[in-house]
Image (cartoon, grey):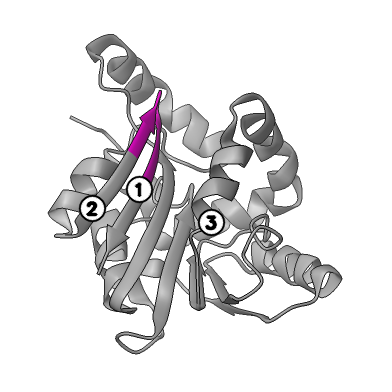
Amino acid sequence: MTRTSPRSDTQGAVTARYDRIARFYDLIDRPMDVLGGVASRRRRLLARAHGAVLEVGVGTGRNLDVYPPDTVVTGIDVSAKMLARARQRADHLGGPFRFEQAAVQQLPFADATFDTVVATCVFCSVADPVAGLREAARVVRPGGQVLLLEHVRPRTRLLGWLFDAINPVVRRLVGPNINRRTEDNIVRAGLDVVEIRRWGIWREIVVRH
């Protein structure tokens, strides 16, 4: 069973963690992108985005320069300090970007607002991931898509136990849970997965609405 601390996973606690690490976040994440090959997979997945795009957990805006030119991107995040950095990056890039402080579990948008919803390394940190996944599907138009790039709890017993054991330390230091069962959460949310690519602990997932 995946163990997380309810006190450490409240929305307020998640927001505080990311406010605290916002100025270091890109530095923390860079080795994973380069050495883990995540950057190339991020580009491949986001090349599928089209139309009106909602990026949940936009963070410091590291995906903004990856989107196809025909997209109009709205980014949300729970952390005001992360959003401040995303806005700085957007100002540098130019383009049709807008930002709002919000949580994916309670999206401030009407049903069927977006053609694409994107989340990269987000549902490892969401206080209620199943509710967040349902909200992501709610705001997608019929025929639209949800694009997910997430790391998950290893399936092997020993590695799974190890990730459970060190998860509280990792969460406290750098923010995310490393033992989320995201594939199971997608099923619990009732979403329709049409494509999934697995490599190690990483998943590229396409959900159609």
Q: Residue at x 26, y 15 (%)?
A: 156
Is residue 5 at all visible to an observer of this figure?
Answer: no
Q: Is residue 69 magenta?
A: no
Q: Secondary structure at mark 3?
A: helix
Say above or below: 107 vs 24. Answer: below
| Magenta stretch, overall SS | strand
Sequence-first tag of 2 and 1: 2
Q: Where residue 176 sits: x, y (%)? A: 48, 42
Q: Residue at x 67, y 48 (%)?
A: 21
Can you identify the residue that label 1 sits on? 205
Residue 81 position, x and y percent, is 68, 64
Question: Is 135 placed above or below 160 here?
Answer: below
- The earlier-in-sequence mark between 1 and 3 is 3
State yes or no: discs 2 and 1 in contact (Cβ < 8 Å): yes
Q: Is residue 169 above or below residue 119?
A: above
Q: Which residue is mark 2?
A: 193
Label 3 belongs to which residue?
Answer: 46
Answer with left or right where residue 155 lies relative to residue 93: left
Residue 66's image quarter?
A: bottom right
Quadrant that contains the C terminus: bottom left
Q: Earlier along the polypeptide chain: callout 3 or callout 2?
A: 3
Label 3 vs label 2: CA separation? 17 Å
Helix, strand or loop status at disc 2: strand
Q: Is residue 90 visible?
A: yes
Q: Which residues are magenta?
A: 197-204
Q: Give the residue furthest to the right.
A: 92
How far, Cα to Cα, is label 1 from label 3? 11 Å
Closer to the camera in the image, 162 or 57:
57
Amino acid beneath label 3: Leu
